[in-house]
Amino acid sequence: MTAAAIRPRRILLEEAVGLQLQEDVISDTDSPPWHRSMMDGFAVISKDFVDSLDYKQAVTLEVVAEIAAGEMTASVLEQGQCIRIMTGAPMPPGADAVIPIERAVSGTSHAHAGEQVSLQDPHFRYGQHVSEKGSFFRAGQAVIRHGIELEPVHIGLAAEAGASHVVAIAPPCVSIITTGNELVPSSQVPAEGQIRNTNEPMLSAAVTRCGAEPIPMGIASDRPEPLRAVIAQGLAADILLLSGGVSTGDYDLVPKALGNIGVECVFHKVCLKPGKPIWFGVLHRPAASPTLVFGLPGNPVSALVCFELFVRPALEKISGKSQFLQDRDQQMARLKNSVQGSRDRPVYHPCQLELADDGLLAKVLPWGGSADLLALSLANGLLIVPKECDGFDRGEMVQVIPLISRLRHKSE
Ligand code: AMP
Ligand code: MG
């Protein structure tokens, strides 16, 4: 099949959040790496306390050294002695418990090396306030299993385990070329006959939402040579998205330009509303993974609906996330109003989906067609009216596609 997953590679840990781990992360260290003090206080020998007949009695010990986090000590503790210790410091040899600083009898808590401290801990437990070496995990242990989608917690854990890189599938790069002589950048005020380039920021955002990296390449005019030149650059990405110029008008030059440059057409035109003119092809390379090329219709609603239906699944597939495709599979909903079909092709109609106690409810929204982006912005789903169907009435069960992450429960 054309959309094969990108090969996994080593990725810098700091750049790996959100990616799917392809190889287990094996720790090079125990955690904690040594017996570690969990308190500021005094490292002691439990026996000094266990032996005292009554814990309520203060035990007086000689402070023989001090140790902060990041330090080691060569002193070996003997009975009757203690070491002043800070949170996070390695326990000195011989010591096996920590008495918190608050348990020093008043006036002695400042005791430093060479002085005496009196410690009184009525709830003393053997080995208290020490986190044992290797009690969380061991060197050689797989601390993160492949298949996990890396969250910030995994990044921290991998860092602790000594992994500067992880093996994952890098986010695909997606070039975006918008075509049309009438377009001006969205930051400009259009002159007579011009319109703002809506699709470039919109498609870039859609690509980002998929966890991929958009490469916006600006506006290409409807002239063969400039179009060819920018397409040649855009083909370096994993996926190339073009918008506009894929229908059959005099200035719809995209299919021809792609064909001339060696992109093999897989399909052109789909029985679908909105989005009929969509073009899809593949540039094969002998030594590298192919570039998938989508010529999306210029009308913004068509472009975004085609992105949802065709580009997003392809992106998920090449990112190695195809098992999540199921999540967006069509679902059934009860219709709250009525909708008309268009007999010649299936219609994907913007609708408002709501989660009720007995399942999904769908309300069809007023919609002015493939350029009416406002209607789509109010929708959180698409309702499918199949080909040759006149429409549906209120109360009928209909097929819908939730648009990811915009579904709310009725009570919200
Ligand atoms: P086309 O697919 O090039 O025939 O364009 C169809 C319609 O979409 C025309 O009305 C174009 O002006 C409009 N259109 C094309 N590209 C864009 C774009 N990037 N942003 C907004 N509208 C566009
Ligand atoms: Mg055009």
Image (spheres, rainbow, N blue to C red):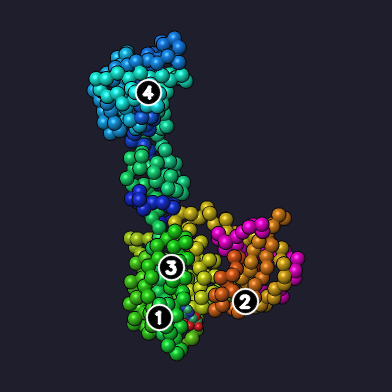
**Whether residue 395 is situated above or below residue 114 in the rendered picture:** below
Is 406 a magenta residue?
yes
Q: CA distance from mark 3 to mark 1?
A: 18 Å
Q: CA distance from mark 2 to mark 3?
A: 24 Å
The magenta-colored residue range is: 384-412
Give residue 340's position: percent from left, percent from top: 69, 75
Please state which of the two labelled residues, at mark 4 or mark 1, is closer to the viewer.
Answer: 4
Q: Amino acid at mark 1?
A: Gln
Ranked by sequence position, the earlier of labels 2 and 3 is: 3
Residue 188 has which mark?
A: 1
Q: Tell me the SS state at disc 2.
A: loop
What residue is pinned by disc 2?
A: 367
Q: Is the Cβ of the residue at disc 4 closer than 8 Å to that at disc 2?
A: no
Residue 204 has which mark?
A: 3
Residue 146 has which mark?
A: none
Q: Amino acid at mark 3?
A: Ser
Q: Amino acid at mark 4?
A: Ser
Give residue 52's position: percent from left, percent from top: 41, 11
